[in-house]
């Protein structure tokens, strides 16, 4: 079929009509084209208004889903953090009960970490007080000595959480041990404070109280507290962790949200626990803090939302407040504390895209009208001359031409309205053979693209933002749990290296001096990847550290660790673990293995595998106590014990060949690199072997160089 443009069709018709009545046709054409221009402009304006209205509605719906997803994701992150704090508190309460009942082994040299006066570094010492009065070590009773023994535990838990301000345990007679060292003011009575009375009312359950003004530093805190009972079920003490409200606000309400939004957290009574702009410092601890409560406001819209929040509901809706008539609020519960999180954003921010579309349509309509008026003005004289001469003949022809031109436009108008109503499968299809037919196909393509785009963008943006926030928080938490290298010690050098394959990994290590002559160390690899492996790694690392500080043998420690991990482990996750204790006096390592890759010993620049029982991984199910074997190996001055995970031996070259144990021993035994530190030597060897291959698994190393008693590094 011959395809002719609209312009060429008009030229042909006009030429035929002008051969009969050229002058008459011109006038009628002028009149009809003017009408057509007015009609086209009005139709364009109506189409623009319709499209703008539909885009506003679609944008509002999409935006509500976005902020609802934002509130849900943020509440999940807060819930994970608070649950971790509650779990840590339960561990503190359990171990504190054992200390107070005399079940734990006493610690010598209490004065090394209990200060009678304010020290230069408060983070090295704990403080013991009774009813606000400082207790001196020389006057300690049996009970205060047991409280003092809790310093390593309190310091360890405090170091695992950057958001904590203080951790402490108080007995029923008013004695308290607190870390870090902070003196309470005169008149302080711990038995009347919210953290103590709240725990007593909780009867052994983890309870969150606050906000209230801390007596130690006169700022708002929220406290996680738990009563401690003896074997007869009698409450003998209370354990508590303080979290600064300002830290809670900065961490979860400011850093995670945009500048165009605000957020707050309320408890089950509707009281605001934290919000942007909340005054939390410079307060007096002796005055009762008056909480802001949403049910005490006169704003009915805010009260209605608060009722839904304290019921544990989640949702997103529009609210009108004085001075802020157009606001959207989204809220979601925090299950661990039965609190609720909400984010509020102005409607003008959500409608920014619709405003831009409105301005674009208005400009196009204005330009279109100017063009038609300019066109008619330029050609009015010619059309007038033509109209006077041939008005009769051209009238009939112009009506036919106008009908032929406007009919497809009306169909396109109907199709545009169908698309605006959400009907992306219109039955209208033009067969004009010109630009209108091409425009019709463009409408079909546009409708299909809009439908796919709206679906894809809603899914991709929501999932991406949610995953990025979770991985960011998980990576920060995981990195904070690993100990820093021990840089200087007269008996050994210790160097670590970790490179996760993804944002979060499953490898972990831990080490610390249990006393002046013994170094505890361990390394492990958790099964699986992603968030699940990260959480299991956190649990395993914490438990291993706790067990290692008890001083028991490595095989008993692995047995206790397996018992703890196998409880409620329905997913059957597991971890391989190698742990040991180095006697710095003799160089003898007492160790036990739970399915982990065998360590390497470097002796006189020769690398060999440490002979050991392979054992089985911890976590999936309980096993007998004799499953984990206690073994020993002597290190001589200059020997290096290299611990590593299977991410090293399972590294592959561009041809897919694995490095393996033999390749690892070959790198470490290379005489050309004997002057390099073991970790650097191994990393250089891996780079040369793998070249540009993408890392497939986590790579973790711990190198312990034994120097001998009294030698210098």
Image (tube, rainbow, N blue to C red):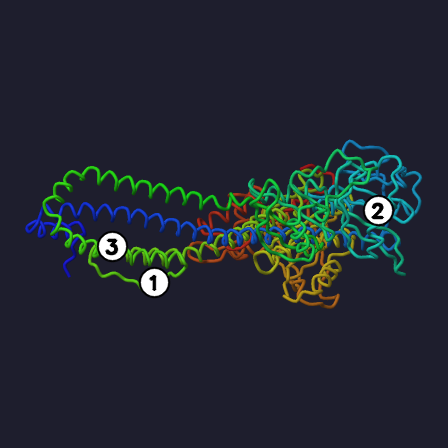
Mark 2–mark 1 contact, CB under 8 Å? no
**Which SS class for mark 1?**
loop
Residue at position x 83%, y 39% from top?
A: 127
Does residue 23 appear anywhere in the picture? yes
Q: Quadrant of the N terminus?
A: bottom left
> In this image, 351 relative to 120: left or right?
left
Q: Nearer the viewer, mark 2 or mark 3?
A: 3
Q: Quadrant of residue 620?
A: bottom right
As displayed, is residue 111 above or below residue 455? above
Judging depth in this view, the residue of 352 and 610 nearest the camera is 352
Q: Which label number is shown at residue 184?
A: none
Judging depth in this view, the residue of 46 and 288 nearest the camera is 46
> In this image, 651 relative to 225: left or right?
left
Using the numbered discs, state the Cα–Cα distance from disc 2 to disc 3 in whole angstroms.
Answer: 92 Å
* Residue marked by disc 1: 426
* Residue marked by disc 3: 406
| Residue 385 in picture, x, y percent from top left | 12, 41
Q: Residues within 10 Å of mark 3 (few under 14, many from 20)?
A: some
Q: Nearer the viewer, mark 1 or mark 3?
A: 3
* Residue marked by disc 2: 149
| Residue 460 in picture, x, y percent from top left | 47, 54
**Which SS class for mark 2?**
loop
Q: Residues within 10 Å of mark 2 (few under 14, many from 20)?
A: many
Q: Nearer the viewer, mark 2 or mark 1?
A: 1
Q: Which tag, 2 or 1, sits closer to the chain's start?
A: 2
Q: Which tag, 1 or 3, sits closer to the chain's start?
A: 3
Direction top: furthest residue: 120
Residue at position x 44%, y 49% from top?
A: 692
Using the numbered discs, state the Cα–Cα distance from disc 2 to disc 1 in whole angstroms.
Answer: 78 Å
Q: Quadrant of the C terminus?
A: top right
């Amino acid at each position: 079929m011959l395809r002719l443009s609209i312009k060429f069709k008009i030229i042909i018709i006009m030429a035929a009509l002008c051969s009969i009545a050229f002058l008459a046709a011109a006038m009628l054409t002028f009149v009809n084209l003017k009408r057509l221009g007015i009609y086209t402009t009005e139709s364009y304006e109506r189409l623009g208004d319709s499209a703008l209205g539909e885009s506003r509605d679609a944008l509002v719906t999409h935006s509500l889903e976005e902020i609802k997803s934002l509130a849900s994701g943020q509440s999940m992150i807060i819930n994970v953090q608070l649950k971790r704090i509650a779990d840590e508190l339960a561990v503190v309460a359990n171990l504190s009960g054992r200390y107070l009942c005399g079940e734990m082994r006493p610690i010598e040299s209490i004065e090394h970490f209990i200060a009678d006066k304010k020290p230069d570094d408060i983070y090295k010492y704990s403080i013991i007080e009774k009813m606000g009065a400082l207790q001196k070590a020389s006057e300690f009773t049996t009970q205060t000595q047991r409280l003092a023994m809790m310093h390593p535990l309190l310091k360890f838990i405090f170091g695992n959480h950057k958001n904590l301000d203080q951790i402490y345990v108080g007995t029923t007679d008013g004695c308290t041990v607190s870390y870090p060292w902070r003196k309470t003011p005169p008149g302080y009575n711990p038995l009347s404070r919210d953290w103590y009375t709240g725990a007593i009312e909780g009867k052994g359950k983890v309870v969150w109280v606050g906000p209230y003004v801390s007596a130690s530093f006169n700022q708002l805190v929220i406290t996680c507290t738990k009563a401690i009972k003896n074997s007869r079920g009698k409450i003998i003490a209370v354990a508590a962790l303080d979290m600064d409200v300002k830290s809670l606000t900065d961490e979860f309400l400011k850093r995670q949200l945009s500048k165009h939004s605000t957020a707050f957290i309320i408890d089950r009574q509707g009281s605001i626990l934290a919000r942007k702009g909340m005054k939390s410092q410079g307060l007096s601890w002796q005055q009762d803090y008056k909480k802001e409560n949403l049910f005490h406001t006169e704003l009915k819209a805010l009260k209605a939302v608060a009722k839904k929040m304290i019921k544990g509901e989640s949702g997103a809706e529009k609210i009108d407040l004085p001075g802020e008539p157009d606001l959207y609020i989204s809220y979601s519960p925090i299950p661990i504390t039965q609190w609720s999180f909400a984010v509020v954003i102005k409607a003008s921010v959500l409608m920014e895209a619709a405003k831009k579309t409105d301005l674009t349509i208005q400009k196009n309509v204005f330009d279109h009208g100017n063009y038609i008026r300019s066109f008619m003005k330029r050609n009015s004289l010619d059309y007038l001359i033509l109209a006077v001469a041939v008005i009769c003949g051209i009238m009939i022809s112009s009506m036919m031409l106008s009908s032929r031109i406007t009919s497809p436009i009306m169909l396109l108008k109907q199709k545009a309205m169908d698309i605006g109503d959400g009907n992306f499968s219109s039955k209208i299809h033009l067969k004009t053979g010109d630009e209108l037919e091409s425009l019709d196909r463009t409408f079909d393509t546009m409708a299909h693209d809009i439908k796919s785009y709206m679906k894809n963008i809603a899914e991709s943006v929501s999932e991406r933002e949610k995953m990025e926030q979770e991985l960011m928080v998980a990576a920060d938490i995981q990195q904070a749990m690993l100990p820093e290298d021990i840089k200087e010690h007269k008996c050994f050098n210790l160097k670590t290296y970790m490179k996760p394959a993804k944002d979060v990994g499953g490898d972990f290590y831990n080490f610390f001096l249990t006393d002046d002559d013994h170094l505890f160390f361990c390394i492990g690899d958790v099964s699986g990847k992603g968030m699940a492996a990260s959480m299991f790694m956190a649990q395993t690392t914490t438990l291993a550290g706790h067990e290692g500080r008890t001083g028991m043998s490595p095989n008993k420690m692995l047995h206790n660790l397996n018992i703890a991990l196998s409880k409620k482990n329905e997913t059957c996750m597991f971890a391989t673990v190698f742990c040991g204790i180095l006697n710095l006096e003799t160089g003898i390592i007492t160790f036990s293995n739970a399915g982990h890759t065998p360590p390497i010993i470097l002796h006189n620049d020769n690398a060999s595998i440490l002979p050991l029982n392979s054992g089985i991984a911890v976590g999936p199910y309980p096993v007998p106590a004799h499953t984990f074997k206690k073994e020993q190996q002597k290190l001589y001055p200059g020997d290096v014990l290299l611990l590593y995970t299977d991410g090293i031996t399972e590294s592959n070259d561009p041809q897919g060949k694995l490095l393996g144990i033999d390749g690892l021993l070959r790198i470490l035994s290379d005489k050309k690199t004997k002057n390099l530190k073991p970790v650097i030597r191994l990393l250089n060897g891996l780079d040369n072997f793998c070249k540009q291959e993408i890392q497939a698994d986590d790579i973790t190393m711990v190198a312990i160089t034994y120097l001998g008693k009294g030698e210098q590094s």
